[in-house]
């Protein structure tokens, strides 16, 4: 089930797990399994991947990180199939992602005896990259009546939807703001007028999708599988250069 009208669907390089995610979601359609259950399972998968890195089982690590990415898509698919959107699930998903991202990079730093400063720079860059992709993607979805649980500007605590508790939304929204607030503010400062864009072409969104978390985890998995773990942290530092390139292209498109 796409989040966009047919004419606005682009080749999302970070969304390679969508087909298996739909299969998983359909398998749980008529069960008591909820999207939040799937989110918790992807957290377990990510933690197993981290454990595999610590134990130098890099092929297995790659497998569980990619499985985490697939399950990350499956929770949203299940919410759409069951027609149970929730802010609780949306923020739990995002907070889980950023914690796992930090732990993955910290683990890579640990096994490579690298620089702690570079690890933090890589994490910061990785999050900024993902934030830029999400920023443009949410703008596109909002423009064409996509899902309503994702908002371009996460400022005020949203009102709980049917089936969820406001207290849960309040807590998770606070966690989300703490984790993502600085990245949202920086990306907005770099491209304030993006929400006014008349067009975000499909080809442009495909380019930006290399910043999606699924693609980031795929790159990490490939580097781990080929025992190139020392290149993971430097890669995400240098990859951040494309943030400014993509913002520049977006501005030229809508000049």
Image (spheres, grey):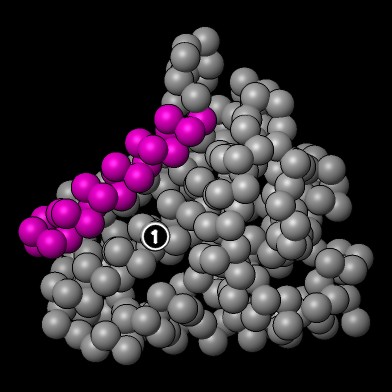
Q: Residues within 10 Å of mark 1 (few under 14, many from 20)?
A: few
Please state if 57 lies on the left or on the right of 231 as rendered.
left
Going 51% across and 65% down the picture, which residue do you hit?
A: 179
- The magenta segment is 35-57
Quadrant including the C terminus: bottom right
Question: Where on the picture, by quarter, is residue 114?
Answer: bottom left
- Please indicate whether residue 227 sits to the left or right of residue 219 in the image: left
Q: The residue tagged with tag 1: helix, strand or loop? A: helix
> Residue at image x 76%, y 79%?
191
Q: Is residue 210 visible?
A: no
Main SS, magenta region, reads helix
Above or below, 234 against 82 in this view is below
The single residue placed furthest to the front in the displayed view is 167
Provide the residue designation for mark 1. Answer: 99
Task: Point out the residue furthest to the left here.
Answer: 55
Q: Is residue 101 left or right of residue 81?
A: left
Q: Residue at x 67, y 76 (%)?
A: 185
**Left or right of residue 14, residue 223 in this image:** left
Q: Quadrant of residue 121?
A: bottom left
Q: Nearer the viewer, residue 190 or 5?
A: 190
Count how many numbered circles sit on residues in the image.
Answer: 1
Q: Against 155, is 31 above or below?
A: above
Q: Is residue 45 magenta?
A: yes
Q: Is residue 165 visible?
A: yes
Residue 137 x %, y %: 70, 58
Residue at x 21%, y 47% (from the top left corner): 48
Expressed as whole percent of the image width and height from the top left, the position of residue 169 reads 62, 43
Where's the N terminus, which quadrant?
Answer: top right
Q: Where's residue 10, x and y in %?
A: 68, 52
């Amino acid at each position: 089930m796409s989040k966009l009208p047919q004419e606005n669907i682009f080749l999302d390089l970070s969304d390679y797990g969508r087909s298996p995610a739909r299969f998983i979601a359909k398998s749980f359609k008529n069960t008591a399994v909820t999207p939040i259950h799937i989110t918790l399972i992807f957290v377990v998968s990510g933690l197993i991947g981290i454990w595999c890195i610590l134990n130098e089982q890099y092929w297995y690590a790659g497998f569980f990180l990619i499985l985490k990415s697939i399950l990350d898509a499956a929770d949203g698919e299940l919410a759409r199939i069951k027609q149970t959107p929730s802010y609780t699930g949306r923020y739990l998903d995002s907070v889980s992602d950023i914690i796992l991202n930090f732990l993955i990079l910290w683990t890579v730093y640990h096994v490579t005896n690298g620089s702690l400063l570079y690890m933090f720079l890589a994490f910061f860059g990785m999050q900024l990259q993902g934030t830029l992709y999400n920023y443009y993607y949410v703008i596109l979805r909002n423009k064409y009546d996509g899902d309503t649980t994702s908002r371009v500007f996460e400022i005020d605590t949203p009102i709980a939807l049917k089936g969820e508790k406001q207290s849960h939304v309040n807590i998770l929204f606070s966690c989300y703001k703490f984790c993502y607030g600085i990245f949202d503010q920086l990306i907005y400062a770099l491209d304030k007028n993006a929400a006014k864009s008349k067009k975000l072409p499909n080809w442009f969104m495909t380019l930006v999708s290399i910043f999606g978390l699924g693609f980031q985890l795929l790159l990490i998995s490939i580097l781990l599988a080929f025992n190139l773990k020392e290149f993971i942290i430097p890669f995400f530092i240098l990859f951040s250069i494309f943030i400014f390139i993509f913002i520049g292209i977006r501005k030229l498109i809508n000049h």
